[in-house]
Structures are given as C-alpha cells and as structure tokens.
Image (tube, rainbow, N blue to C red):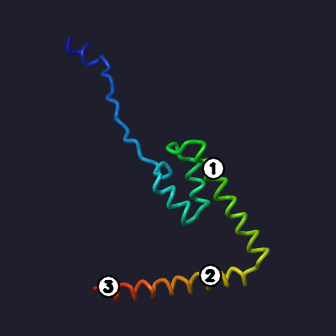
Amino acid sequence: MNENAMDVPQPKKKKKKKKSKKWYNNRGLIFLALMLFWPLGVYALIKSKKVKTGWKIFLTLLFVGLSVLGVLLLGVFGTAAAITATEAASEAAVEATAEMLELLESYP
C-alpha cells in the first residue's frame, strides 16, 4: 500500500506570480514624462491601461500639435524671436522676484 501511495503524482503547487506594476500605468509618471520629454510621455500614454481612450487621443494630438506649432513658429520667426521672447520672460521674472522681495521686506 505504501508503494501505491508513492506512485500517485501529487499536484504541483502553483506559485503566485507577483504582478509587477508597469511604469507606463502610473498616471503621475505619464504626466511627468509628458512635461519633461513628451515623446516618452506619449508612448507611455498610448501603452497605459489606466487612461481612457478619449484622453489618449486628446493628449496625443495636443502634444504633437504643440510640437509642430513650435517648429513652424521657430521656422517663421527664427531663433532671434525665440531668444528675444526668452530674454523678455527672464526680465519679467527678475522684476517680479524683486517686487516680491520688497513686499516681504516691508512686511512687519
């Protein structure tokens, strides 16, 4: 009887596989990727299962459209206009910072 009991194959225990969370299913990382390096963000957006299809289409068209618009504007206005706009923005930021510091110093 012992021999028969040993010959019976025992069912193998199934190992539970831990589901690894894909980086492109993390909405925070998708947003960060869209802001820092939009091609990677668009890839993550398309691969994600957490973002609805309507949002995928809208955000993909938005970021691709903004990129095309930026290239076209750069071609039309050239780098001089881009540099001038950057300098103006920098000057405005410096002035705003100086005003904020003055307000903070005058606060009792």
Q: Count of labels shown?
A: 3
Judging by the rendered image, the residue that carries numbered circle 2 is 86
Camera-nearest label, 3 or 1: 3
Dot 3 alpha-carbon crowd within 10 angstroms: few under 14, some 14 to 19, many 20 or more: few
N-terminal-most mark, 2 or 3:
2
Q: For this view, does 83 lie left or right of residue 32?
A: right
- At label 1, the amino acid type is Phe
Question: Are the residues tagged 1 and 2 within 8 Å (C-beta)?
Answer: no
| Quadrant of image for the N terminus | top left
Dot 1 alpha-carbon crowd within 10 angstroms: few under 14, some 14 to 19, many 20 or more: few
Q: Residue furthest right?
A: 76
N-terminal-most mark, 3 or 1:
1
Residue 84, above or below 50: below
Query: Foreground residue, 61 or 16?
Result: 61
Q: Which mark is residue 58?
A: 1
Q: For this view, does 5 lie left or right of residue 66?
A: left
Residue 102, above or below 52: below
Please state the horizontal and vertical placement of residue 108, each as a whole percent of the image: 27, 86
Measured Cα–Cα span from mark 3 to mark 1? 46 Å
Q: Secondary structure at mark 3?
A: loop
Q: Secondary structure at mark 2?
A: helix
Q: Which mark is residue 32?
A: none
Please state the horizontal and vertical placement of residue 55, each as a whole percent of the image: 58, 47
- At label 2, the amino acid type is Thr
N-terminal-most mark, 1 or 2:
1
Question: Are the residues tagged 2 and 3 within 8 Å (C-beta)?
Answer: no
Query: Foreground residue, 88 or 53?
Result: 88
Please state the horizontal and vertical placement of residue 49, each as a whole percent of the image: 52, 42
Camera-nearest label, 2 or 3: 3
Judging by the rendered image, the residue that carries numbered circle 3 is 107
Measured Cα–Cα span from mark 2 to mark 3? 32 Å
Residue in the picture at 42% in, 47% down: 21
